[in-house]
């Protein structure tokens, strides 16, 4: 059986964002497991305009094509005003069927570990027929980031990351039979 393809989706496009650091940490540890093909997907690379405001057929096609090639996801989610970023919501809305019958894990960060953003994302994923897994990595801006900008995670997050990836792979494999 071939390895599953898991996209690590960076949920922010803002200048000075720290999601690339978090994504690289996830990818480094995920790759060391050797159990799937992990790839960082930066939504900023797709230059998606606000849905419905411009002709984005080319960008939308590229975005959907990328998602169609994936079996599951790990979302890197930062909390903005108790929710996910507008850029992530917009990217989620640009696809429909490409999300269906896949699994996702969440790595969130913010003042309370990004918990409120993660919970908002769970509701959206349910509508998109994405099975979000129970274990989630919650990173604190106060203890896991030096000066709120340099990612230095506590060792304890490694356990949750591995448990989350185990669940994402199990569900992604099971759901692949539905596609």
Image (cartoon, grey):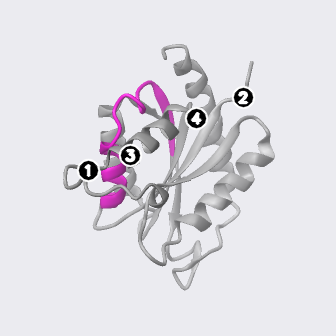
Residue 3 is marked as 2
Q: The residue tagged with tag 3: helix, strand or loop?
A: helix
Does 84 sit above or below residue 172?
below
Do tag 4 and tag 1 residues touch (Cβ < 8 Å)?
no
Q: Residue at x 61, y 26 (%)?
A: 170
Q: The residue tagged with tag 1: helix, strand or loop?
A: loop
**Would you name the residue on which mark 1 appears?**
55
Q: Residue at x 46, y 55 (%)?
A: 43
Do tag 3 and tag 4 residues touch (Cβ < 8 Å)?
no
Q: The residue tagged with tag 4: helix, strand or loop?
A: helix
Crowd band around label 3 with a 10 angstrom C-alpha radius: few (<14), some (14–19), many (20+) = few
- Residue 133 visible here: no
Label 3, label 4: how many angstroms apart (C-alpha)? 30 Å
Hey, which quadrant is residue 144 in on the image?
Answer: bottom right
Name the residue nearer the viewer: 75 or 118: 75
**Would you name the residue on which mark 3 appears?**
58
Crowd band around label 4 with a 10 angstrom C-alpha radius: few (<14), some (14–19), many (20+) = many
Q: Is 149 on the left or on the right of 90, as rendered?
A: right
Label 2, label 4: how many angstroms apart (C-alpha)? 13 Å
Percent coordinates x, y for residue 28 in the rendering: 73, 55
């Amino acid at each position: 059986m071939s390895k599953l393809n898991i996209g690590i989706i960076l949920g922010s496009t803002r200048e000075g964002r720290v999601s690339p650091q978090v994504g690289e940490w996830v990818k480094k540890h995920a790759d060391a497991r050797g159990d799937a093909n992990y790839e960082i997907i930066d939504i900023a690379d797709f230059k998606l305009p606000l849905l419905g405001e411009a002709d984005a057929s080319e960008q939308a096609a590229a975005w959907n094509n990328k998602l169609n090639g994936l079996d599951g996801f790990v979302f890197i989610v930062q909390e903005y005003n108790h929710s996910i970023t507008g850029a992530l919501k917009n990217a989620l809305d640009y696809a429909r069927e490409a999300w269906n019958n896949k699994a996702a894990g969440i790595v969130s960060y913010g003042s309370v570990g990004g918990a409120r953003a993660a919970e908002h994302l769970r509701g959206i994923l349910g509508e998109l027929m994405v099975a979000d897994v129970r274990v989630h990595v919650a990173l604190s801006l106060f203890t896991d980031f030096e000066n709120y900008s340099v990612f230095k995670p506590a060792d304890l997050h490694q356990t949750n990351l591995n448990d989350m990836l185990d669940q994402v792979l199990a569900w992604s494999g099971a759901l692949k039979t539905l596609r």
